[in-house]
Image (spheres, grey):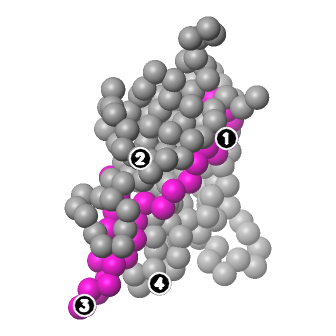
Amino acid sequence: MRAAALVFSMACLTASARADLEWHEFDHDAKLHIGELSVTVEGREVPDAAFKEDHLLLTVQKPGGKPHELWLNSTYASGAVAVHGNYLLVEYGIGRGTFARVRHVKILNLDGGLEELADGQRSYYLPTDHDPEEVIYQIDVKEEEHRSVLTFTLPAARPGLPAEKVVAIRNESRIVPGR
């Protein structure tokens, strides 16, 4: 049985504890320390790749733990990571060219060997009279009794885009039998 089960919802949820995410930007050659967590980002060789710099290897290690690897493709070899509890959030880019790169976020289980729990689009480009405008969702994390809720919220309402996207991750390790 999986340690976490996903429930997707577009409903507004009531909050208990909230947390702000601290994002750490990276490129194709970075060593990051987030609390006690070590994250190393390196370019990886992919023969015949059109954009060789986009192929990355993230190595994540807790103190005294074994390293876990994530192969990631991110436009222009750039992105960011944030940690919340047992979750590693990895922001990466898809799409190449002027006003083409959109941001996505992978949510990974740090206690599950970087098992991917969810992946969501974090930005969009909206047409304007001149250059398109990039609209970026803010991410808020709330801890509830048996789950973590990640809410992607637009800073201001935009026609044609959902104002809010919600990912709820059930944390079975916090479920007490008989409750």
Gap in Å between the C-alphas at discs 4 and 2? 34 Å
* Residues marked 1 and 3 touching at CB (< 8 Å): no
Gap in Å between the C-alphas at discs 4 and 3? 16 Å
Asked if residue 123 lies in the magenta stretch, the reply is yes
**Amino acid type of disc 3?**
His
Residue 104: which disc? none
Identify residue for label 1: 115
**Rendered residue at 54%/36% (across/down):** 169
The secondary element bearing badge 2 is classed as loop
**Amino acid type of disc 1?**
Glu
Count of marks placed on residues? 4
Which comes sooner in the sequence, label 3 or label 2?
2
* Residues marked 1 and 4 touching at CB (< 8 Å): no
Image location (x, y in percent) of residue 113: 68, 35
Identify residue for label 3: 130
Residue 97: which disc? 4
The secondary element bearing badge 4 is classed as loop
Identify residue for label 2: 11
**Amino acid type of disc 4?**
Gly
Asked if residue 126 lies in the magenta stretch, the reply is yes
> Callout 4 environment at 10 Å: few (<14), some (14 to 19), or many (20+)?
few
Q: Is residue 101 left or right of residue 111?
A: left
Which comes sooner in the sequence, label 2 or label 1?
2
**Rendered residue at 45%/64% (across/down):** 103
Q: Nearer the observer, disc 4 or disc 3?
A: 3
> Residue 63's image quarter?
top right
Between 74 and 132, the one nearer to me in the picture: 132
Which comes sooner in the sequence, label 1 or label 4?
4
Which comes sooner in the sequence, label 4 or label 2?
2
Quadrant, the N terminus: top right
